[in-house]
Image (cartoon, rainbow, N blue to C red):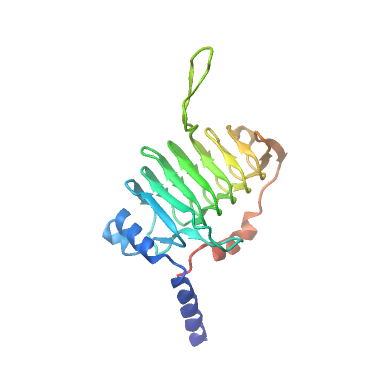
């Protein structure tokens, strides 16, 4: 049994070794962390990724482990890469433990912006995240593929009669155990409660916490669809850890 276990471990690590983008992994960790943290390589990169700016900061709260954060992970179908992943980090990126970022994601944290990932928070493939002020993902909250999280209107907007300037940015705060389906747009001022499910192809742009926990919302813009509705997280946790954690 000991030899079989050793062989399986060797086989797994060898397979993983050739998937990791070691140049970007080593560069990022030593660029963003002090040597005592960088040598543990807490962040792994997979596939092609462009670092357009790394002038910001990365903070990891909790014990530092190797490969606790994955960028470009292939944990869902399809398994192929489009090679469009990009990271521009001018603000602050915070991880509260393990986190996963899927294939071909685009992330921009502007100067002054703060983006925070809760424990086991995840972005699916082809997700676009643009943070100019504040974006917070709760523990175990997952964002489905081809979704976008944008806390800014990008351009100044005004009332043509009163000349009132509308706010350019608005914080986004997603609660714990949120299941965001695919192709969802999460826009400025979106706030969700814990145990919230958002239907596919929906638009979130408001505070939904008054609706309470265990809800299904959806539509354009999102509205309450069903109460007493939640994803069965407890039955999935072991499977999610097996598929998403990088078992180095």
Q: Is residue 218 left or right of residue 11?
A: right
Q: Residue 152 or 67: which is nearer the viewer?
A: 152
- Residue placed farthest to the right in the image? 226
Residue at horizontal 49 percent and vertical 79 percent from the top: 11
In the displayed structure, would residue 189 be above or below residue 52? above
Residue at horizontal 69 percent and vertical 36 percent from the top: 224
**Quarter of the figure with the C terminus:** bottom left
In the displayed structure, would residue 232 be above or below residue 220? below
Residue at horizontal 36 percent and vertical 39 percent from the top: 111
Residue 194 lies, in percent from the top left, at 58, 43
**Residue 66 lies in quadrant:** bottom left
Q: Residue 37 or 56: which is nearer the viewer?
A: 56
Residue 168 lies, in percent from the top left, at 46, 28
In the displayed structure, would residue 230 be above or below residue 192? below
Residue 94 lies, in percent from the top left, at 41, 48
- Please indicate, yes or no, whether residue 175 appears anywhere in the rendered image: no
């Amino acid at each position: 049994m000991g030899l079989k276990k050793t062989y399986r471990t060797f086989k797994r690590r060898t397979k993983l070794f050739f998937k990791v983008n070691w140049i970007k992994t080593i560069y990022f960790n030593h660029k963003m962390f002090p040597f005592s943290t960088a040598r543990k390589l807490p962040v792994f990169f997979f596939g092609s990724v462009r670092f357009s700016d790394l002038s910001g900061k990365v903070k990891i709260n909790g014990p530092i482990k190797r490969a606790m954060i994955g960028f470009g992970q292939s944990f869902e179908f399809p398994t192929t890469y489009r090679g469009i992943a990009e990271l521009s980090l001018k603000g602050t990126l915070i991880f509260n433990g393990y986190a996963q970022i899927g294939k071909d994601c685009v992330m921009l944290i502007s100067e002054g912006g703060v983006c925070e990932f809760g424990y086991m928070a995840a972005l699916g493939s082809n997700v676009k995240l643009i943070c100019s002020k504040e974006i917070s993902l709760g523990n175990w909250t997952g964002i489905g593929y081809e979704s976008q999280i944008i806390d800014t209107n990008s351009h100044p907007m005004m009332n043509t009669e009163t000349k009132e300037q509308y706010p350019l940015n608005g914080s986004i705060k997603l609660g714990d155990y949120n299941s965001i389906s695919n192709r969802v747009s999460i826009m400025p001022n979106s706030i969700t409660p814990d145990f919230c499910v958002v239907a596919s192809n929906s638009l979130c742009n408001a505070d939904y916490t008054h609706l309470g926990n265990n809800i299904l919302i959806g539509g354009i813009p999102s509205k309450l669809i069903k109460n007493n509705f939640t994803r069965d997280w407890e039955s999935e946790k072991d499977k999610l850890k097996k598929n998403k954690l990088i078992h180095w």
